Image (cartoon, rainbow, N blue to C red):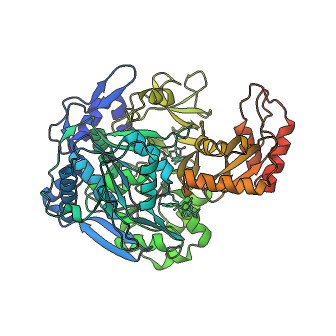
Amino acid sequence: MGYSDIYAAWKSDPEGFWMEQAQAVDWAEPPKQALFDRGDHIYEWFADAKVNTCYNAVDRHVEAGHGDRTAIIYDSPITHTKHTLSYAELQTRVASLAGALRAKGIEKGDRVIIYMPMVPEALEAMLACARLGAIHSVVFGGFAANELAVRIDDAKPKAIIAASCGIEPNRVVHYKPLLDGAIDIASHKPDFCVIFQREQEVARLEDGRDVDWHAFQYGVTPAECVPVEGNHPAYILYTSGTTGAPKGVVRPTAGHIVALNWTMKNIYNVEAGDVFWAASDVGWVVGHSYICYAPLFAGCTTIVFEGKPVGTPDASTFWRVISDYGVKSFFTAPTAIRAVKREDPKGELAKSFDLSKLQALFLAGERADPDTIEWAQKLLGIPVIDHWWQTETGYSIAANPTGLELMPVKIGSPSVAMPGYDVQILGEDGHPLPAGELGAIAVKLPLPPGTLPTLWNAADRFRKSYLDAFPGYYETGDAGMIDEDGYLYIMARTDDVINVAGHRLSTGGMEEVLAAHPDVAECAVIGVTDDFKGQLPVGFLCLNSGCNRPHEEITAEVVKLVREKIGPVAAFKLAVVVDRLPKTRSGKILRGTMVNIADGKEFKMPATIDDPAILDEIREALQTIGYAKA
Ligand code: COA
Ligand code: AMP
């Protein structure tokens, strides 16, 4: 059966479709019912079943006789280290870590924050939590102590598992002082912290609070897998929303296993024993789904790559890894390919590697620009597949299901809706729009298994952010259109979220930081188009009257402040002082118009603008920092 048959089969009987996919999972108690309607547009999947995530990722493969198969390849050009872990070794290590966590009181439902770089131990920590039914929350290493503190206060973890350091090309990232700082700032204090000491930096352990990763496992009884209810949260992953307070996306256990397992063959066309590589970071959803869980559910070999597309040591790294390990499906962000293309425009470095096993390159996390797709297609001679999804869904809403049927690639489109998703384009009045018309992209409820049922500690915010705008639909926050062939086009966000180098960031969050500067009376942050990173944040500052300090001093201070409060990943380096911000007569800042000016796009003068002359001032200010294209 091809794509349209499978999609039609799902649409005619969604519950039957997912019950069938559920057969690929090893259940402690199989589901009798697929969908549970909790009323008021809240749904859960497989809530009557019992299952364990770690058992499905690790133990079942060992029990089936595949213990010798490689589960994880660790390749770290940044530390010049490589090693592998078989499924049997992974089982032993995870059971031991889980046993040690249990001995220190971690039980089903307890939260554990994981703050680690791209080392296999990060996956082991995630799996050890899953083994116990503890709920992990991984925090990306590029965030500052303050962001970690916000997550500590929201998740209220009983334990934090951290590494002593991460390594960026230009510096060692001292995780331990960031962790200590975050715990100082946070009101909630964890019972204990487990520190994985790396040889690049051995951190000082806090008496009575910190335990060493190896020492605390000494002599413990390994833990068995604890079955949990199908709707038990597997993890919380914080992602950027409109304000500085991140949204804690909850991932339900059973649906997560069922859906991710389905995607491996049907979307990525890989099976047990194949090597699958997602070059992302465990701190993002791509890392959760496609570095850790999905490849392991499917019995594949996954690669934990600690490096960058360029500079570790050069733009050949991706091709070297693909060739060394016989990668069959490769997934990364368009920015990463742009980085390689920038360093090696003719792709000369790829030529000395055997890339014959590579079947397809998958891109997601941000818009895939046609130049990048075409460059990769020409270089690799394989399908380059754009696919669209979000932290909230955990896997593709729209993709080209290469294992089911390779559909014609339309450059600029992440192809078609996947089974589970009835995607519609809605007008402002909430009615579906015809093909070719631009509107809000929404998904008819219920969302499929594995997608977020709520936000952690924030059921009201969940409703307001996703369900209230269009009753009966999930609002994705993206705008776009669907063409006559059912191909989707993602054009822009409808909220204050921007995408910088494939990283999802909140301009609202940055504005909160700028507004806290004592000289700033008012501010706005917009995302301007950038050829390399997709978007870049630019800050506009209006100063308090009477402030006569040099503008360069103040802009340098706010740049430093964003790095300190949010983290280097915000990539906030551009700020400019202006006299006024363009506003509507009712006082709303016209951020969209400012973006159009920066990007040199034609735009209609907003009818409600208070004073059109301000737009010229904005253009001039952008020109002083090299960003007004017209
Ligand atoms: N820990 C600490 N700091 C980090 C970090 C981490 N895990 N990841 C990034 N940073 C820092 C960088 O060192 C950089 O710091 P600097 O300002 O001191 O140079 C800053 O955050 C901005 O990083 P980034 O925007 O990633 O820019 P870059 O120039 O360092 O790298 C790319 C550019 C394209 C190589 C890189 O962004 C990349 O590989 N992108 C792919 C994105 C991706 O995988 N996204 C996941 C979704 S699929
Ligand atoms: P994240 O939750 O970090 O995965 O970011 C999700 C957001 O990134 C989406 O809502 C989109 O705005 C954007 N995005 C992800 N994938 C794509 C894609 N293939 N094309 C365009 N935008 C994308």
- Name the side, left or right, on which 333 lies relative to 117: right
**Residue 116 x/y as whole percent:** 39, 59
**Residue 436 x/y as whole percent:** 61, 35
- Name the side, left or right, on which 389 lies relative to 73: right
Residue 482 appears anywhere in the view: no
Q: Residue furthest right?
A: 613
- Name the side, left or right, on which 290 lies relative to 316: left
Residue at the spot 29% in from the left edge and 35% down from the top edge = 17
Q: Residue furthest front?
A: 207
Image height check: is 248 above or below 72?
A: above
Q: Name the image quarter holding the N terminus.
A: top left
Image height check: is 444 above or below 115?
A: above
**Residue 132 x/y as whole percent:** 21, 47
Residue 88 appears anywhere in the view: yes
**Residue 513 x/y as whole percent:** 61, 45
Image height check: is 78 above or below 27?
A: below
Q: Quadrant of residue 510?
A: top right
Q: Nearer the viewer, residue 528 or 387?
A: 528
Q: How many numbered tags mark residues here?
A: 0
Q: Residue furthest bottom?
A: 352
- Name the side, left or right, on which 192 lies relative to 426: left
Residue at the spot 74% in from the left edge and 42% down from the top edge = 594
Q: Quadrant of residue 212?
A: bottom left
Residue at the spot 84% in from the left edge and 39% down from the top edge = 614
